[in-house]
Image (spheres, helix red, strand yellow):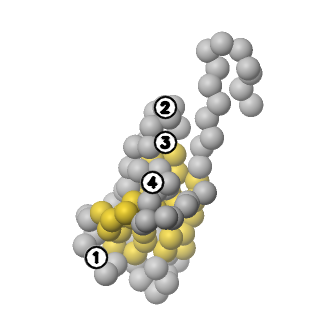
Amino acid sequence: MCGAGAGFARLALQMFLAPAPAGGFWVHYDNPELLEDDPLDAVTTPWWGAPDLGSVSWRGSIAAIPGKNAYYIVTPFGRVYARGDTPITPDSQYGILSGASVG
């Protein structure tokens, strides 16, 4: 825990996991090396045999699609990014969710 004095910053690093269908999992987490309060400082990585579907640099939650090598990243701003065998193209931004709240 950081002190309350000048020059100290408190960062809440987030990490989310999603299972891959054939084993392993994807981890979407804040990049602690950047140490800035910037929504573009996240990384997505495969672990234990999950396929590498590319990283999403926006902070957000990850949700796997059951039975598919695919996941969505949903940002706190309501943007949805798709990777893998999703109904939309892997490099696209799905759009904005209106009225959505991601905690």
First in sequence: mark 4 vs mark 3: 3
Q: Secondary structure at mark 3?
A: loop
As displayed, is residue 69 above or below residue 40? Answer: below
46 vs 35, nearest the viewer? 35
Choose the circle earlier in sequence order: 4 or 1: 4
**Given contact means CB atoms under 8 Å apart, are the residues at marks 4 and 3 in contact?**
no
Foreground disc of the pair 3, 2 = 2
- Residue at horizontal 49%, vertical 42%? 31
Q: CA distance from mark 1 to mark 3?
A: 27 Å
Task: Report, in whole angstroms, how far the alpha carbon at label 4 lies from the one at label 3.
Answer: 18 Å
Q: Which residue is drawn at the image coordinates 50% and 54% (left, top)?
A: 76
**Which quadrant of the view contains residue 41?**
top left
Marks 4 and 2, Cα distance to the nearest angstrom? 18 Å
Residue at mark 3 to residue at mark 2: CA–CA distance: 9 Å
Element type where label 1 sits in the image: loop
**Which residue is denoted by mark 1 in the rendering?**
88
Q: Amino acid at mark 3?
A: Asn
Q: Amino acid at mark 1?
A: Ile
- Amino acid type at circle 2 is Glu
> Tag 2: Cα neighbours inside 10 Å, few (<14), some, or many (≥20)?
few
Identify residue for label 4.
Answer: 77
The residue indicated by pointer 3 is 31
Q: Amino acid at mark 4?
A: Phe
The mark nearer the N terminus, 3 or 2, is 3
Q: Mark 4 or mark 2, which is nearer to you? A: 4
